Amino acid sequence: MDYEEMKRELSRRLKKSRYEHSLGVADTAAFLARRFGVDESRARLAGLLHDCAREFPNEAMTAEADARDIGYGEVERAMPLLLHAPLGAYVAREVYGVEDAEILRAIARHTVGGTAMTALDKIIYFADMMEPTRDYPGVEALRDLARSASLDEMTLAGLTRSIAFVLEKGHLIHPDTVLARNELLLACRSKDL
């Protein structure tokens, strides 16, 4: 399946607003890839397909993950929407024919992050937070960082914003998000020494 065929298939499977968000993430990821010297076509593809598993209703996420032997913990059991990211990596392979391990990994990590994030992981994570259809307090500051900060500083700000948002909502914080933030915070601090 080529990129245009993937777009058509995705538009069939997702509601219109989710599809438009996916196009926004694809374009934003391509911009960030150019800025940070990452392969633009891979970033665009990962951005396009990052939410491909959102075709499944929330209540079906655990069953879909179980059917594919995707392991998950209590946080995902309590908040099954989080499973759309790792499930998306499987759907990208099953439905869209994506075999590129780095693209699949970026899709799988775009919601909660994780340790040892690659440049592509960081780009997809951040592009999802600040693409043009996103509208929430603080998003413009994130967009400014996308034009001015280093990749690690930008991602650190995104992880910090995500944790603050989840805390404000009173939800569980995924341990991978905390680990990703701590790792980047330590890396950024060591660069300042």
Image (cartoon, grey):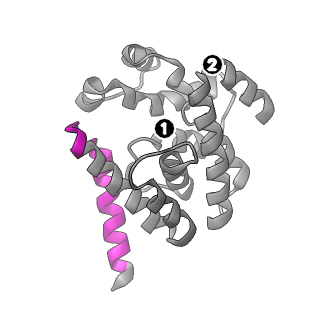
Assess whether residue 73 is covered by the magenta stretch.
no
Which residue is found at the position 29% from the left and 50% from the top?
Answer: 163
In depth, the one of 136 and 163 nearer the eye is 136
- Circle 2 sits in a helix, a strand or a loop, which is it? helix
Which quarter of the figure has residue 60?
top left
Element at label 1: helix
Q: Residue at x 40, y 56 (%)?
A: 138
- Between the residue at mark 2 and the residue at mark 1, the CA separation in whole angstroms equals 19 Å
Looking at the picture, how far across and down is residue 23, in whole percent?
A: 66, 39
What residue occupies the far left of the structure in this picture?
170
Counting other residues with Cα less than 10 Å from the Cα at mark 2, is it few (<14), some (14-19), or many (20 or more)? Answer: some
Q: Nearer the viewer, residue 25 or 85?
A: 25
Left or right of 182, for residue 107 = right
Give the residue type that dot 1 points to.
Ala
Numbered circle sitting on residue 108:
1
Residue beneath the point at 32% across and 67% down: 185
| Residue that extends furthest to the bottom in the rendered view of this protein | 193
Q: Is residue 122 above or below residue 146?
A: above
The part of the image, by quadrant, that contains residue 55 is top right
Magenta-drawn segment: 167-190
Q: Is residue 52 left or right of residue 179?
A: right
Q: Which residue is mark 2?
A: 13
Between 145 and 112, the one lying in front of the other is 145
Which quadrant of the rendered structure holds the N terminus? top right
